[in-house]
Image (tube, rainbow, N blue to C red):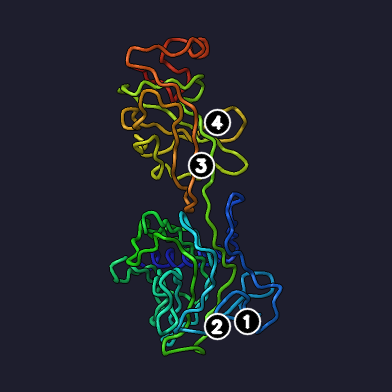
Amino acid sequence: MLKKNNNLLAFLVLSVFLSMFIIFVVPTEAIVLVDENYNDLSNGQALPGWTVGVFAQNQEFKSPSMGAKVTTNIPFAYRDFPLTQGIIIVEVWMKPKMGSDTNNGLRLGNYLTGKNDAGDYNNGRILFWKNDQDKWWYDNGAGEPVFIADYDGNWHHFKVVYDTSTNKHDLYMDGSLVKTDIPCPVDLSAGISAVGLNSGRWGRYPDTTSYFDDLKVYTSEITVVIDIKPGSDPNAINPNSKGVTPVAILTTPELDASTVDPLSVKFGPAGATEVHKQGHIEDVDGDGDLDMVLHFKTQETGIKVGDTEACLTGKTVDGNDIKGCDAVVTVPSKGKPAPAKQNRLGPQGKLSTVWGKIKER
């Protein structure tokens, strides 16, 4: 038992040590709404664009020379940005004050129904927080807190991936997924326009101090390159086939295909899922990079005769949304693929590569 506990302690210490060196980068395709570090500000300067209670400080920071502190509990301190719908990603480093006199949380909302008497947006909700017992929690959507982890007094990185179309979000801590599809009891389907932070327990500004740094808010969907039925030209699909359709996600400078979560991927209008519950890593296009090949039951894709394009959606393991499309040519049940396919692949419907050893019917 002692050896097991020592191993656990070593793992926790290593995790904290590694988190000090993690760099989280906004994807190049992102539409950036907020991207703040505070290195150009003076110690004690109020943060531009924020409501009352947040200041630059040089005591605790993740950036090279300056971080920020929040010193208000009621209301939250808010950073406004243009009302935005779709996939909204919020990333921030947080280091709350430890102890029973400090709660420290993150809130999302919008201005559409104004603010309450306390100064908080009516249309808003706290998504996660450190409580007065030094534990991290998130709201399960029913007003019930769910335990994440004990707070150790160190910096931690949080990422929220909020989908206004479903009013649900995914939560990550230090690069690891905490929970997917967490519902929000407040309707933010009209968009999000503010992120809020608080610190304290007892009342209004000023209250106890907690630290934060490198706040980022952006909306992003990474466009990926996919190859439906790799090696096939054209990509002939019989919608009534009882076989599977292979699809390759190709590695590009914008995306390492091995970082795609295969369980999140859906293909075709009906959103077919991977039949093997895993991705197959290999170099599909012969460029020396490793790509990911996935297989989908053709009849579950929702592709119909006459369709000329099919698309794939999913997420990377760190929560970024991906989407890619490729051309298709549909053929009826007794149709034959184009001669070019026979010339390149040999016997009809039998692919020469490992991902396509399934006969069309």
**Of pointers 1 and 3, the one earlier in the residue sequence:** 1
Could you say which disc has been placed on residue 283 in the image?
4
Q: How would you rate the neighbour count of disc 1 (Cα within 10 Å): few for under 14, some for 14-19, many for 20 or more?
A: some
Question: In the rendering, which numbered label is found on residue 46?
Answer: 1
Q: Nearer the viewer, mark 1 or mark 3?
A: 1
**Residue 206 % position (x, y):** 51, 90
- The disc, 4 or 1, on the residue closer to the chain's N-terminal end is 1
Whether residue 304 sits left or right of residue 250 in the image: it is left
Instruction: Say above or below: 43 vs 266.
Output: below
> Residue 199: x, y in percent?
48, 82
Give me the C-alpha separation between circle 1 and circle 3. Answer: 43 Å
Near mark 2 (Cα within 10 A), the count class, few <14, some 14-19 or many ≥20, is some
CB within 8 Å, label 1 to label 2? yes
**Residue at the disc numbered 2:** 52
Residue under circle 3?
Answer: 258
Q: Residue at x 54, y 64 (%)?
A: 82
The answer to whether residue 7 is left or right of residue 224 is left
Q: Going from the N terminus, do you reach mark 2 or mark 3 first?
A: 2
* Position of 38 relative to 322 (above/below): below
User: Compared with residue 51, is residue 266 higher up or lower down, i.e. above or below?
Assistant: above
Is there CB contact under 8 Å for labels 4 and 3? no
State if disc 1 and disc 4 touch (CB < 8 Å): no
Distance (Cα) linking label 4 and label 3: 11 Å
Q: Give the mark nearest the N terminus, 2 or 4.
A: 2
> Residue 75: horizontal and vertical position, in percent?
45, 82
Task: Please identify the quarter of the rendering in which residue 187 is found.
Answer: bottom left
Q: Which is more foreground, mark 2 or mark 3?
A: 2
Instruction: Check if mark 1's residue and mark 3's residue have beta carbons within 8 Å.
Output: no
Q: Quadrant of residue 304?
A: top left
Real-space CA distance between mark 2 and mark 3, rounded to the nearest whole angstrom: 44 Å
